[in-house]
Image: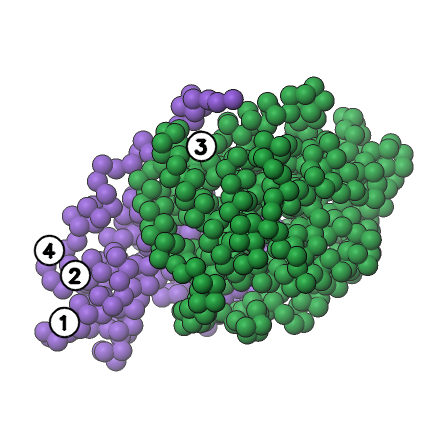
Chain colours: A green, B purple
Amino acid sequence: MVKRYTSMAYKNADDMIFGTAVHPVKAELGLEVGAGYVTAEVNYAPRPEAGVSKEKLVSEYRKLTTDILARAVQIGFPAVSLETEHVEQMTNNPTWGGEIAHVQKTILEEYHEEYGIKCGLRHTPGDIREDRDLLALIGGKYDKLMESFEAVADGGADFLSIETMGGKEILDYSILRNDVPGMIYAIGCLGGIDMGMIWTDIKKIADKKGRIAAGDTDCAQANTAMFIAGGLLDKNLAHTLAILARVLAGSRTLVGYEAGAQGPGKDCGYENTIIKSITGCPIAQEGKSATCAHADVMGNLTMQVCDLWSNESVEYHGEFGGTSVQCWSQTLNMDAALMNTAIQTGNAKVLRDMMCLSDKYRDPQGYVLAYDNAFKVGQAIVKDGNDLYLRSKNAVVEAIKILEASKKEGKLVMSRFEQNALADAKASVEALTNESDSFMSDSLAKYKAEEPRFRPEANYKF
Amino acid sequence: MDIDPTKILVRYNVQKEKAQSPEQMATEMFPKTEPARSVAKAIFEGEEDDVIEALEKAIEKGASPIALIDDVLMPGMKIVTDLYDQGVIFLPNVMMAADAMLEGIEYCKETAGSSPKPKGTVVCHVAEGDVHDIGKTIVAALLRAAGFAVVDLGRDVPVDEVIAAVKKESPMMLTGTALMTTTMYAFKEINDRLLEAGIKIPFQCGGGAVNQDFVASYQLGIYGEEAADAPKMANAILAGKGLAQLKDQFHKH
């Protein structure tokens, strides 16, 4: 049974800061997240050919883990956290993921013992819940996924995470058709329903194994929207629509915490500033030091209230400066050192505001996710926190309000396309009911007719 | 703390915005005669019912349903894709227009009881182990919108199934998308199996973690950075370009 958030953890947006969370969490090897300092979280992917066998994969992760720890010690960093996002072979074969977690944790323990470096290990099984053509959120794949969580928890992973896919069948349809009610239904409602189920079970495993249920992210939907939206000159999706997907992700990702997750939230959850404002839980974020993985329009802003600072993902290979994981872990750790210096010298809020302002007006997405505006979205979500539909709709309404209000300020300049998309979105949201039941039943009928991959009974127990 | 953002960023998209609205530009491009004009307008607006209504009227007046596909529906869609290529309209507009056009083509085919000859056949798939298929969906829609027949194998497709489909369909091109590094390794296997079978068709690969260096490491691989590259590549093949020329044109880095 989930316990809904109906109030904010922070009284004011200005109270939020990087490195400190209302509810810090502690890993096994001395690392505390949100306890007054920021730590680098290094994330990586194996080379393509490493996936052909368990032995090759284990060897790949052994090498890259050793590389990261060796570089951290060489440069003198006090702490580091690792995130292993599973390739499909590792989750589909739970013993593979479990063994890799064990190998990695053993290396972390050795370095912790010898040098005292504080370490954390996050494992993120892949959401394998699908058949060839359909999402299959409940059933055999769900059971296998839970086995994977058990295995990585046994292997020593401190933080358990996942990027769940609930609602994606409708999101993929609606995002390509400028269908804002469809986005609300996909992300806020269907995604929220799925998260309530899966995170209740992940929390049980975490508690049983003495691990931390960390958090989810709406990568499959909000990041899909952000990725499709692309840069300033891309014409694949209006950025004003991408930010609506993102604030909806705030309502959805929150469900994991309502089911017992404690953070640190996953790095690619750009909605995490909203989540931190509501829950007070620590968050990981990615941005300017994740250019190895993707381009985005808010590389500094995302650092504003982070507790772990991540590179998102880099393929393991050689660079001039060492292996890729060494290069990126060094960059992340230097970023963390700067933030920790700001904390120690009493300049944290100054640095936070500089990071925020350097991107705030770059794009509608950064503008709404600036911590002051993200806080307002958080307030809109908890206002009707008990109702997945209403709080999602509230988030969209608030984001539209924030963007419209920006016109008076005059600093965020939006293209005509973005403004037209925003106006269309506003009109479609204003036409929506305030009755959750009728929205759900209307959407059910509409998408059953329009999207053959939608299986409401099997996936969402309708 | 506050700033003047104009010194630290430039909104190039606002600067580059055309003086005319997309609607104005499209209106200038619509054919002057009916039913082509009504159909093109309905396609541009993504209005399926209006497309069918205009086609019905034309057929009632004696137009050939199959001729309408080539003479009216495809040119109508080309206005939309041209505006997308020029950066004037967004992808959702293209997707909705494609939905409307494809509905129109189905109507014409049913009415005629036959099908027109497509420009060529393309087999599309998502790599085994990978279920992220929005990129493939966009590729397939853009290819169909450009007049190609698409055999969509779906997602998480085993190598054997891809090879069998290529042998059965004899496509002019194969496409593959993948999000993860280890799943995209299947592309190399597909390349090797196709070569073993003596099949040398361009194999367009793209998506999330896929990069040009990896794709260039196997003989048939052509890297597609954007989904919109797919129809351009198919048209280049129709124009007679071989593997080396395709790599030259589409390998940008």
Which chain is indicated by disc 3? Answer: A
Q: Earlier in the sequence, mark 1 or mark 2?
A: 2
Q: CA distance from mark 1 to mark 3?
A: 49 Å
Can you tell which of label 3 and label 4 is closer to the viewer?
3
Q: Height in image: A132 above or below B11?
A: below
Image coords of residue A188 (percent x, y): 52, 57
Q: Height in image: B88 above or below A135?
A: above
Mark 3 touches mark 4? (CB < 8 Å)? no
Q: Could you say whether the residue bearing mark 1 is in a helix, strand or loop?
A: helix
Can you tell which of label 1 and label 3 is closer to the viewer?
3
Residue A362, label in figure: 3
Q: Are marks 2 and 4 on the same chain?
A: yes
Q: CA distance from mark 4 to mark 1?
A: 17 Å
Read off the residue under disc 1.
B57
Q: Are marks 3 and 2 on the same chain?
A: no
Q: Are marks 4 and 1 on the same chain?
A: yes
Read off the residue under disc 4.
B32
Amino acid type assigned to the residue bearing label 3 in the image: Arg
Amino acid type assigned to the residue bearing label 2 in the image: Ser
Read off the residue under disc 2.
B38
Q: Is residue B104 toward the left or the right of residue A139 in the image?
A: left
Q: Is residue B5 toward the left or the right of residue A39 in the image?
A: left
Q: Earlier in the sequence, mark 2 or mark 4?
A: 4
Amino acid type assigned to the residue bearing label 4 in the image: Lys
Residue B199, label in figure: none
Which chain is indicated by disc 1? Answer: B
Q: Is residue A49 toward the left or the right of residue A383 in the image?
A: right
